[in-house]
Structures are given as structure tokens and as C-alpha cells.
Image (spheres, rainbow, N blue to C red):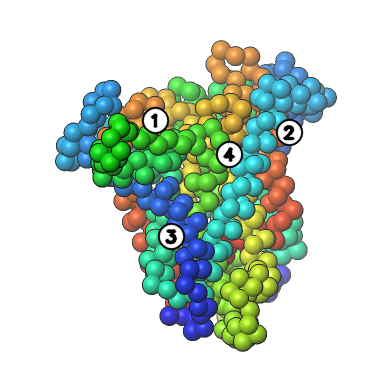
Amino acid sequence: MIKRSFFKSKYLPYLLILPQMAVTLTFFYWPAIQGIIQSFLLSDPFGRRSTFVWFYNYIELFTDPLYLESVFITFVFSLAVAFVSISLGLFIAAMANRALKATALTRTLLIWPYAVAPAISGIMWLFLLHPSYGIVALGIKRWLGIDWNPVLYGSDAMALIVMASAWKQVSYNFVFFMAGLQAIPKSLIEAAAIDGAGPFKRFWFISFPLLSPTFFFLTVMNIIYSFFETFGVIHTVTQGGPGGATNILVYKVYQDGFVGLNLGSSAAQSVVLMSLIIVITFLQFRFVEKKVQYGG
Amino acid sequence: MVEKTPLLDFLTYAFLILGIFIVGFPIIYSLIAVTLPLEEVSKIPMPIIPGDQFMVNLKEAWTRGDLGTQIFNSFVMATGITVGKIAVSMIGAFSIVYFDYRFRVVAFASVFCTLMLPVEVRILPTYEMAANILSPVQAIWDVLHLDSLMTWFSGHDISVNLNWSLLDSYTGLVLPLVASATCTFLFRQFFLTIPEELCEAAKMDGASPMMFFRKILLPLSKTNIAALVVIEFVYGYNQYLWPLLITTNPKMTTAVIGLQNLIPQADDLPEWNVALCGVLLVMLPPVLVVLFMQRWFVKGLIEKEK
């Protein structure tokens, strides 16, 4: 294959790969297969017997208005998180890239939210946007005249979890945009400047197109993040409420399976999520090929 | 830059400061809140001059949330995941890159495919697995009807119930998360860039594979390991769903999950000063790791996602 010189040993390579294989088989493949099997079964309420029901669980799922609503909510949520965090990250990175004297300082000041757990960011934003004690909520009520109450109104709750989830992603996106911007050859920028392009034009016609691989990559990563890793935000802040307005797919799987013990439906939901992430992973790999063409 | 644009430069710095302020605002505001007594923090709006109640609130949060135990648990979990992940994926990658055996491609493909199976998409079955890690053995046992076979052999009624639960244990918190496609991938990519000649020279000098690993690969991988330590520590410390599933005993739960008990609910006293104290304390370790190992962190972040 790629390497030509190998060590020779009969048992050592197997021994070395064994821990990895053992963990993946027991905690990844076996449960995944169990989940797929479970999604075709229907258990009685006491969990003693299960019958094979073909696609019953899936048909139930896709005719369930609550599930379809959850799909819709998840898409709105992840697009909003991706949009807010990417645009803020790009904006700050573009500014920081101009402010060359303060690059290191800016990085230090912006990087740390990445280390904050989504659930913790959720609590901090809950305090800021709390209907009775939040300072930002007060501002919204007083200056925008909106009757802000994330405990009662679904759209407000959604805005709250979008803010809490997007906040820590801003620093993630910032790191990548900053790396992308600094990788752009200075000669391109200078050539454009000699041709009379101003700072804005240079950004739009040179930096921005050259950032497109980063942009695509971050869109995928942010969507994955908001699909799967924001569970903590939902669980600490809204618990899917009010009235299911923030019940994203991952939270619904947890609720239906772990709390509601509806095994078949939960398994079917898991399989749907699995297919989703397979599609996303393929998209990501097509992008990796693309990135090679751009040549960094 | 290329031309002089004083106005634009001014705006750049102004927006930059504004951006940093917006990103930092939740933390600045929380830092003020934790120094205030209850009657101040529940004023609307809360005063922005720090008070002197920080130690009182801290003590309250520490005892009420049992933060000592939980932060310790988080540390154990994060350290276990970091060390385990790096060790497992490094020797795995070594096996895949430096040995030629039949199983190799299958091994690599199967590790790689775990990318598509995050814990979030297999919540229940993985929980069941952890509840009885021997269940696959049991299933095979049952399928083969070994019970009746054994009964037939020995003449006694034998039924085998294999049960080994990982619930509420450190093993359970750590073990399922130590397999990592991205880490294995990263080490594989890195090993492939190491010149062939090193391996050939080592072989010529009669070094065994493990000697080559210890004396050459390990020192060469230092920067990669440092970068991964930062990333994986943060990842492990901030885990939410998995610890939530497998711990029911409050003494075994992790700090990020335990914090929920501190949030004031509708009928409670609005003790946000105490809650935020817990929040700041719990988020401190990973934040410090990222800030002090910033260089490795940025490297790790960018390399890992390649």
C-alpha cells in the first residue's frame, strides 16, 4: 500500500489493534445492530415479548405529527445556530485579521468559550435571558417592546437555545476562519491592491472565495454540532419545552426511549439519525477531495 | 496593510472590541453576579458593581452541589478518556501502518465507520450494553442453546446468566468513549509522513517493532499527542449525554450534569449567585487547559478535523 517497509510479526499487529476493535465492537457495532433490529420489533408494555412488525415503527414515526414537527424544529435550530455562529466567527476573524497588532491577544480572548460545555453555556444564557431576572431579557422587553418569555413562548425558547448553542461555536469558527485567512498568500492581496481594489473589494473577491472550503467545512461541522452535541443545552435549559418547541431529534430519542420507554419508536428514530449522519459524513468526504484541489 | 485607511482601521478595532465584548459578556456578567448577595442579584436590573459575597456563595455552591465529588469524577472521566483514547488509537494506528496483515483493511475500515455512530444515535442499545457488558456473550450462548447442551452433558440443570454491569462506575464512564476514529486517523496520517528510512534503519539495527515504537515513533509524535491531550481533555470533561445515561448515583455523576440541581426553578429562591458560582467553578478546568495550552489546542483543533 502506502508504506513499503513493514515489520514482520505473527501476533503483534492483532494484539495492537485488539483494544480498539474490542471497544468498537462492543460499544459501537453491537449496539448499532441491536438498534436496527429493535426498530423492526414491537414490544408489549411490559417488555417481555416483542413481535416482528416490519416497517411499522417507521410508518408510525413518519405519520406522527410530533415527530415531523421535531424534524422541522431541528432543521430550523441547526440552520440558525450555523448561521449565527459562522457569520459572527467570520466577522470577528476578518476584523482580527486586519488588526494585525492584536492577533495573539484577540485569539486568547476569543478562544476560551470553546472549552465551555454546551450545558454550562446554556445556564449562563438562561440567566441573561431569564424572563424575570435576565439583563438581556430586560433590554429586549424595554427597548424592543417584545413580551419576552422563553418559559411560555416557543419561539423565545428557541432563540434562547440558539444563542446558548451558537455562542461557544463562535470561537470554534473563529479559529478556523483565522487559520484560513492567514493561509491566503499576501501576494494575491497585494496584487489586487495595486490594481486598485479597496479593502472591501479585496475581501469579497479574494479572501471570501478562497475561504469557501473553510466555509463549507464549518457549515457541516456546525450542523453536526447542533444536531448532536447540543443535547446538554436542551436538557438543562428547556427540556424540550415549552410545548415541544425545542424538542430536537436527539432529545426526542432520549425522551421517547429512555424516559418514555417506547423502545421500537426510539430505535427507529436512532436509525433515522444514523442514516442522516451517514449522509453528512459522505458530504464531508466529498469536500475533503475538493479541498485538495484548492490546495489550501 | 497595503494602504492607509485610518477610519477603517478605527472601525476594525472598534468592531473587534465589540465582538470580544459580546462573546465575553455572559462571563463578565456572571462574574459580577457571583459576588452579590441574594437580594442584590434578584434586583431588576442587577447592580453592575461587584459585591463582597463571593466566598459565601462559593461555599454554598460547593456544599449544595457536592461539587468536590463531582469535579473529581469529571477529572477522572476526562483523564481516563484522554489517556485511553490516545493510547488505544496510537497503537491501533501503529498496527495499521507498520504491519502488513490480512485483517488490516477491515480493521481500518471498521474503526473509520465509527465516525457515523456517535453515542447520540444509539442511546438505548449502548445503555443496555453497559448495563450488562456480557450480553453479546449471553446472546450467543442462548442462540447456540448451550444451556441445554451443558445440561445434557453434565446431567444437572444448568442455566448461565452472565452479568457484568458498568453502570455507576468509572469504567462505564470512560471505556465506551475511548474508541476514536478521528484520533486513529490523525495518527495514521502522521505515521505515513514519517520517512521510510527511519523504519528501515531501525530494522537493520535489529530493533523490535515495540522498540521502534517506543524509541522513534513516540518521541516523534510528541506534538501530536500534546495537541490531542488538550482536545480530548475538553471533550471528556464536557461529556453530557453518556454520563447522564449511565450514572444514577449522585456520587458518581459528573460536574457538568450535577450543575442542573443548582439552577433555581420557578418556585425556588432565585439564587442565581450560587448557581453561577458553581457554573464558573465547573467550567474553570477545561478553560484553563485551553488558555494555557493554546498553541497545542489550535494545532489539535485544525489537524484533527482535516
Specify the amino acid type for callout 1.
Phe
- Helix, strand or loop at disc 4? helix
> Disc 1 to disc 2, how far (Cα)?
36 Å
Most foreground residue, B286 or B4: B286
> Disc 4 to disc 2, how far (Cα)?
32 Å
- Helix, strand or loop at disc 3? helix
At a point 36% along the width and 61% down the height, the residue shown is A282
- Helix, strand or loop at disc 1? helix
> Disc 3 to disc 4, how far (Cα)?
24 Å
Specify the amino acid type for callout 4.
Tyr
Most foreground residue, B284 or B221: B221
Specify the amino acid type for callout 2.
Leu
Of tags 4 and 2, the one toward the viewer is 4
Q: Is the residue A9 above or below the residue A248 in the image? A: below
Q: Is the residue A235 above or below the residue A284 in the image? A: above
| Mark 3–mark 4 CB contact (< 8 Å) | no
> Disc 1 to disc 4, how far (Cα)?
21 Å
Find disc 2 in the rendering and name its residue: B31
Q: Which mark is residue A258?
A: 1
Quadrant of the rendered image containing residue A182: bottom right
Give the percent coordinates (x, y) of residue A2. 46, 80
> For the residues tagged 3 and 2, is the chain the same?
yes
Counting other residues with Cα less than 10 Å from the Cα at mark 1, is it few (<14), some (14-19), or many (20 or more)?
some
